[in-house]
Image (tube, grey):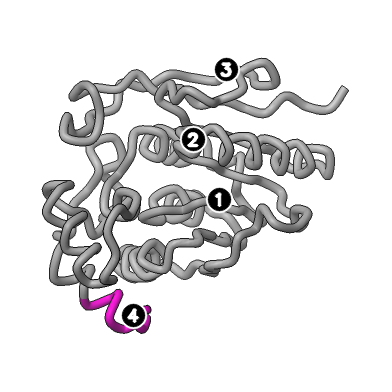
């Protein structure tokens, strides 16, 4: 496994500082194309069949959620916030810019943690960054939990939904950004707003993804 400093250097060499189309207030280290950086990641780690480098792109769900948080800072201002499966750190950075007291950016991918560290630095903010699998344990006490584009795989989605249900029962506000992934459980969600998010056709099935922000329904 590469050391953290190698992850940081790999990201610097294979990305450019760019602003996501829907969130121009934030600058991220992003890849221009998916396949080359995907292949380079496999070469660096000596593994084949790795999942896409989620950290290298501003996915539609994350862009929509970040936009919503920046436009409604009262949701996170002065609060302890978790960005679950942070990827590039986009949503975590948006929450901090919107006035969150503390933001934990969590992701099990060490490249994502390294990218988030670089991106936080590029935006002159401080985040707590963790590579633990938070889904293995009961949720900690967060005021707000943000989840961008995490419901693309059946088993993972089931784990995330169950974990978020526990967090909601503890009083957390749960907000989800999702561009219509197959395993989002809408029956327990309240629709908040839609965005038309520019994305790359190389990763998605269109150049614009209609993307929703959802809120997990309060406990009755």
Quickly name the residue at label 1: 84
Q: Please report contact status of discs 4 and 1: CB closer than 8 Å, yes or no.
A: no
- Asked if residue 15 is positioned above or below residue 145 in the image, the reply reads below
Q: Dot 4 lies on which element?
A: loop
> How much space separates mark 3 and mark 2, taking CA atoms?
21 Å
Q: Which mark is residue 2?
A: 4
Quickly name the residue at label 2: 153
> How much space separates mark 3 and mark 4, taking CA atoms?
41 Å
The disc, 4 or 1, on the residue closer to the chain's N-terminal end is 4
> How much space separates mark 3 and mark 1, taking CA atoms?
20 Å
Residue 169 seen by the camera: yes
Identity of the residue drawn at 60% across and 46% down: 76
Percent from the top left, x then y, of residue 169? 83, 38
Q: Dot 1 lies on which element?
A: strand
Label 3 neighbourhood size at 10 Å, few (<14), some (14-19), many (20+)?
some
The disc, 4 or 2, on the residue closer to the chain's N-terminal end is 4
Q: Nearer the viewer, mark 3 or mark 1?
A: 1
For the record, the magenta segment spans: 1-9
Quickly name the residue at label 3: 191
Percent from the top left, x then y, of residue 152? 45, 33
């Amino acid at each position: 496994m590469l050391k953290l400093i190698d992850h940081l250097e790999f990201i610097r060499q294979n990305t450019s500082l760019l602003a996501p189309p829907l969130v121009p207030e934030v600058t991220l280290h992003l890849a221009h194309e998916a396949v080359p950086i995907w292949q380079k990641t496999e070469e660096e780690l000596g593994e084949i069949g790795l999942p896409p480098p989620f950290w290298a792109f501003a996915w539609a769900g994350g862009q929509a959620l970040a936009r919503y948080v920046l436009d409604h800072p009262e949701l996170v201002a002065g609060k302890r916030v978790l960005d679950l499966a942070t990827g590039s750190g986009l949503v975590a950075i948006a929450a901090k810019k919107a006035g969150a007291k503390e933001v934990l950016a969590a992701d099990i991918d060490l490249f994502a943690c390294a990218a988030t560290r670089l991106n936080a630095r590029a935006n002159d903010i401080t985040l707590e960054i963790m590579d633990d699998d938070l889904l293995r344990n009961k949720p900690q006490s967060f005021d707000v939990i943000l989840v961008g584009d995490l419901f693309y795989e059946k088993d993972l989605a089931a784990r995330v939904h169950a974990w978020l249900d526990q967090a909601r029962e503890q009083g957390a506000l749960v907000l989800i950004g999702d561009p219509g992934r197959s395993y989002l459980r809408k029956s327990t969600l309240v629709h908040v707003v839609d965005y038309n998010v520019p994305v790359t056709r190389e990763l998605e099935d269109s150049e614009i993804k209609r993307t929703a922000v959802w809120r997990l329904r309060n406990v009755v």
